[in-house]
Amino acid sequence: MHEWMGDNHHTPHIVVDASFDGVSVPAEHIKDGKIILNISDSAAHNLKLSNDSVSFRARFGGVPFDVWVPMRSVLGIYARETGQGMIFSHDTEQIERSQLQEEIEETRERPHLTIVK
């Protein structure tokens, strides 16, 4: 899915449940126990996707951070431009599809360019 989005010039994002043990993300960017991460080639350096985890180095507010999330904490992946993607369900949890859809829509509405003087 990640490759397909990149091949089609879309920006892949993952929704992560930050309450899982082992999740290493910048705490100041967690909202309602979740964080949305841009995993495009231009944003996620040294991206490693495996059956067990997702890891990469990225900048958050200009500060570099090594991100590591266990695959079980990934709730979904979607293209920022279209909002289309996949929501994953886990055996032990029930994911509210409408709540994730609202978060995806909110991300799509945010401007992604800033003025630098």
Image (cartoon, rainbow, N blue to C red):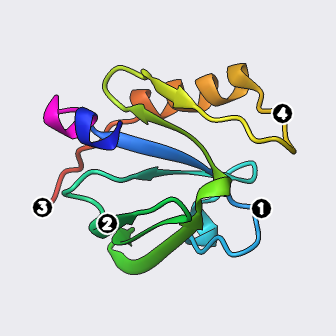
Residue at the spot of label 4: 94
Q: In the rendered structure, which disc, 4 or 1, sits on the residue that comes first in sequence?
A: 1
**SS for tag 1?**
loop
The first of marks 2 and 3 along the sequence is 2
Task: State which mark lies toward you, 3 or 1.
Answer: 1
Q: Secondary structure at mark 3?
A: loop
Q: Give the extent of the magenta segment.
A: 5-10
Q: Please state the horizontal and vertical placement of residue 2, each as a whole percent of the image.
A: 32, 42
Distance Cα–Cα, label 4 vs label 2: 28 Å
Q: Residue at position x 21%, y 56% from top?
A: 41
Left or right? Give the position of 22 relative to 115: right
- Residue type highlighted by circle 2: Leu
The reply to whether the C-beta atoms of the residues labelled 4 and 2 are less than 8 Å apart is no
Residue to which mark 3 is pinned: 117
Tell whether position 54 is magenta: no
Q: CA distance from mark 2 to mark 1?
A: 22 Å
